[in-house]
């Protein structure tokens, strides 16, 4: 599927009707084929779009309006149900098309494994890139119950692709002992439990670098985001996540792409998870796209 094909479904608020003059392509990756606990994140992208309709277009944090950034919501990639390998190939090809047109890819997940093919496409264009990972889970396993394609493995794969010294993880509070040992010995940067303060300390080492950012909504405490597949107690607040997004936007780094994943709306009848996710996306659009 081409990212510029006609799409007739729901779109994020104030999406432009034509892709040609847009700086950003927003796209959905509706995949939850490998989740280890609760499925349903394949429905996340469309529910984030629906929730965006309740947003103000103006951000008082940034004093910016969505009319100031040009973005095109291309809809969801039509991934083959239950086929992880083929789905990942399709995502990589799709993002490669976006990059070939020199546009900023902004993905909506879906389970966290979808970030892996995105990074493969990004790495071809930005071989010097760094990776910022905001999440409750380390995602550093080599396999999960014998399966190497798992939402528990993307960050390990990314470490092996771009070098662990270029990977920065924040907010981590769940994983196997072996994952935390790998983080200590590999040279990657991992900060447990918190996001804002360790991010402030890490940003000088990322100055002037190309950076891809992934946000797993479960970095938030379940009190703020119950609608996710593997909720973990002890997380940060939505206010802190917004502060981290703003810190990244203010830093002297070049954010070249991003995604927000693991919204599983069935587990949140209040819709606060997708409402929070849509506000984060608004701030990412206004703060990260230069």
Image (cartoon, rainbow, N blue to C red):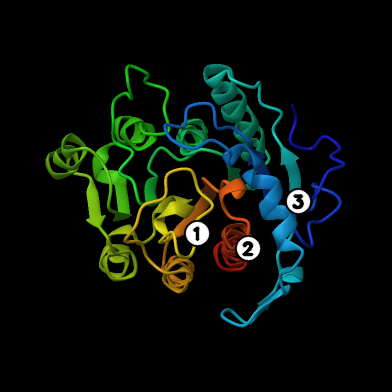
Disc 3/disc 2 C-alpha distance (Å)? 20 Å
Name the residue located 51 percent from the left edge and 45 percent from the top edge.
262
Q: Is residue 73 visible?
A: yes
Disc 1/disc 2 C-alpha distance (Å)? 9 Å
Q: Earlier in the sequence, mark 1 or mark 3?
A: 3
Q: Earlier in the sequence, mark 1 or mark 2?
A: 1
- What residue is pinned by disc 1? 225
Name the residue located 47 percent from the left edge and 57 percent from the top edge.
254
- What residue is pinned by disc 3? 72
Residue 94 image position (x, y, % from top left): 65, 31
Viewer-proximal residue among 173 and 65: 173
Left or right: residue 235 versus residue 269 is left
Q: Do residues under tags 3 and 2 come within 8 Å of each other at their CB atoms?
A: no
- What residue is pinned by disc 2? 275
Viewer-proximal residue among 38 and 244: 38
Residue 176 image position (x, y, % from top left): 22, 37
- 58 is higher (above) or lower (below) than 77: below
Left or right: residue 138 versus residue 65 is left
Q: Earlier in the sequence, mark 3 or mark 2?
A: 3
**Residue 32, label in figure:** none
Residue 143 image position (x, y, % from top left): 31, 23
Disc 1/disc 3 C-alpha distance (Å)? 26 Å
Name the residue located 61 percent from the left edge and 46 percent from the top edge.
266
């Amino acid at each position: 599927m081409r990212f510029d094909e006609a799409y007739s479904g729901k779109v994020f608020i104030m999406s432009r009707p034509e892709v040609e003059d847009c700086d950003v392509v927003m796209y959905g990756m509706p995949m939850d084929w490998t989740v280890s606990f609760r499925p349903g994140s394949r429905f996340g992208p469309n529910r984030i779009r629906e929730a965006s309709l309740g947003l103000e277009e103006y951000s008082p944090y940034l004093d910016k309006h969505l009319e100031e950034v040009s973005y095109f919501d291309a809809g969801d990639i039509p991934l083959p149900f239950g086929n992880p390998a083929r789905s990942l190939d399709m995502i990589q090809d799709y993002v490669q098309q976006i990059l070939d047109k020199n546009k900023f890819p902004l993905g909506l997940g879906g389970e966290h494994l979808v970030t892996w093919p995105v990074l493969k496409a990004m790495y071809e264009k930005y071989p010097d890139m760094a990776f910022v990972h905001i999440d409750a889970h380390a995602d550093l396993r080599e396999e999960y119950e014998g399966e190497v394609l798992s939402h528990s493995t993307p960050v390990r794969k990314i470490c092996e692709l771009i070098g662990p010294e270029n990977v920065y993880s924040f907010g981590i509070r769940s994983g196997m002992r072996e994952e935390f040992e790998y983080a200590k010995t590999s040279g990657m940067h991992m900060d447990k439990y918190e996001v804002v303060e360790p991010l402030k300390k890490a940003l000088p080492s990322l100055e002037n670098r190309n950076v891809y950012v992934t946000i797993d909504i479960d970095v938030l405490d379940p009190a703020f985001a119950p609608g996710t597949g593997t909720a973990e107690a002890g997380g940060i607040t939505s206010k802190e996540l917004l502060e981290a997004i703003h810190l990244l936007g203010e830093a002297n780094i070049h954010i070249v792409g991003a995604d927000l994943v693991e919204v599983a709306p069935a587990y949140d009848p209040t819709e606060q998870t997708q409402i929070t996710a849509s506000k984060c996306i608004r701030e990412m659009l206004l703060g990260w796209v230069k």
